[in-house]
């Protein structure tokens, strides 16, 4: 399985027009089903294999509140054998898209075209999720003798060793992500 190549859906599809909801008063809401069963890009080097579920968009006095329960398949490396695989996880969203933009209320906002962009939000959630260890399958044997001769660069090996070392440590993954972003 090689995720590096191949076609994918444009992340533009993750923009949702909420202009109609903005012009309605606070308290109005809409349910929006999401159903992407194809590979979709959420950032330059970040892809989902599938994204399904339902969003509830609620007009509040501060903008649009996006809530939802999503099922995400994220393309990532197995922390044991380092092979790429599609990791499935549930994602609960509750995020304000401010309108007008207001950085003290939310980093996300409704843009000038009355659209919200889910891609940066998904990117953030997936980066947090990626700090958790995940395996291609429960009984993944790790780097077997067969795969020892395959090229693994030093950084990957280092990260894998660190992941193993960190096994017993309580590290808040959200802090780890913050550290990366900073
Ligand atoms: Zn594996």
Image (tube, grey):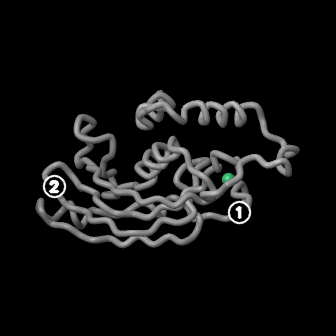
Say which of 7 and 170 sits in front: 170
Q: In whole angstroms, how far apart are the C-alphas of marks 1 and 2?
A: 40 Å
Q: Residue 86: x, y in percent?
A: 60, 60
The residue positioned farthest toward the right in the image shown: 149
Which numbered dot is residue 92?
none
Say which of 155 and 55 sits in front: 155
Q: Residue 24: x, y in percent?
A: 15, 65
Q: Residue 164: x, y in percent?
A: 61, 35
In the image, what residue occupies the spot 73% across and 58% down? 2
Q: Is residue 29 left or right of residue 179?
A: left
Say which residue label 1 marks. Answer: 6
Answer with mark 1 or mark 2, whichever residue precedes in sequence. Answer: 1
| Tag 2 secondary structure | strand
Q: Residue 39: x, y in percent?
A: 59, 65
In the image, what residue occupies the spot 33% across and 55% down? 93
- The quarter of the displayed image where residue 117 is located: bottom left
Say which residue label 2 marks. Answer: 60
Instruction: Tell me if the residue at label 1 has its CB under 8 Å from ligand 1.
Output: no
In the image, what residue occupies the spot 47% across and 35% down? 177
Q: Is residue 101 left or right of residue 5?
A: left
Q: Residues within 10 Å of mark 1 (few under 14, many from 20)?
A: few
- The quarter of the displayed image where residue 25 is located: bottom left
Q: Residues within 10 Å of mark 2 (few under 14, many from 20)?
A: many
């Amino acid at each position: 399985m090689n995720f590096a190549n191949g076609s994918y859906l444009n992340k533009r599809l993750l923009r949702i027009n909420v202009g109609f909801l903005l012009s309605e008063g606070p308290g109005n809401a809409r349910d929006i089903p999401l159903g992407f069963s194809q590979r979709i890009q959420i950032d330059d080097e970040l892809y989902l294999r599938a994204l399904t579920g339902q969003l509830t968009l609620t007009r509040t006095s501060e903008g649009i509140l996006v809530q939802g329960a999503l099922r995400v398949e994220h393309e990532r490396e197995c922390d044991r054998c380092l092979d790429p695989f599609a990791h499935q996880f549930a994602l609960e969203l509750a995020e304000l898209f401010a309108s007008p933009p207001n950085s003290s209320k939310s980093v996300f906002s409704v843009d000038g075209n009355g659209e919200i962009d889910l891609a940066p939000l998904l990117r953030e959630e997936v980066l947090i999720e990626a700090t958790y260890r995940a395996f291609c399958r429960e009984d993944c044997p790790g780097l077997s003798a067969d795969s020892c001769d395959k090229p693994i660069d030093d950084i990957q090996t280092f990260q894998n060793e660190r992941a193993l070392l960190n096994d017993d440590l309580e590290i808040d993954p959200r802090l780890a992500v913050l550290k990366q972003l900073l």
